[in-house]
Amino acid sequence: ANASYYAKIVLEHAIMRRLVEAGTKKKAVIASNCLPYSSFPDDTIIKIDNDKKGWYKAMKRILNNPNMIVDYSNKLHEFVVEHYNIVKWSKFRHDLYMSL
């Protein structure tokens, strides 16, 4: 049981790294509405039901609305810069330790 638990955690961290990478490169993401994707705000990732219809509808929406790709990629980028900026959080930790 422990091995499958740790495998799940490793997989979720790998997915999170891919989402952060997509955000830094201003790429839009279509993903199933489940963890870890569901932890991101709705306006940063195109979340779908995990079935053929969900994927089809999402692809059709973005093909018919190219600005949607730009909007989602920019929102994901802004979210990643704010919440996953290593320089910002390293400075925060440094300042915290120095205040102790």
Image (cartoon, helix red, strand yellow):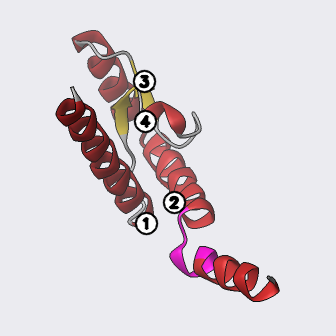
Tell me which residue sits at (42%, 24%) in the image: 33
Residue pointed to by mark 3? 33
Tell me the residue that label 4 is attached to.
Answer: 37
Which amino acid type corresponds to the residue marked 4 in the rendered image? Tyr
Q: Earlier along the polypeptide chain: callout 4 or callout 2?
A: 4
- Tell me which corner region of the image, top left, top right, bottom left or bottom right, holds residue 78: bottom right
Question: The C terminus is located in which quarter?
Answer: bottom right
Badge 2 or badge 3: first in the primary sequence: 3
**Disc 4 crowd, CA 10 A, few/some/many (<14, 14-19, 20+):** many
| Range covered by the magenta-colored residues | 84-89
**Quadrant of the drawing holding the N terminus:** top left
Q: Are marks 2 and 3 in contact (CB under 8 Å)?
A: no
Q: Amino acid at mark 1?
A: Thr
Q: Where, by quadrant of the figure, is residue 96 drawn?
A: bottom right
Q: Main secondary structure of the magenta part?
A: helix
Q: Is residue 77 above or below residue 96?
A: above
Q: Earlier in the sequence, mark 1 or mark 3?
A: 1
Q: Position of residue 31 (x, y in %)?
A: 35, 32
Of mark 1 and mark 4, the one earlier in the sequence is 1
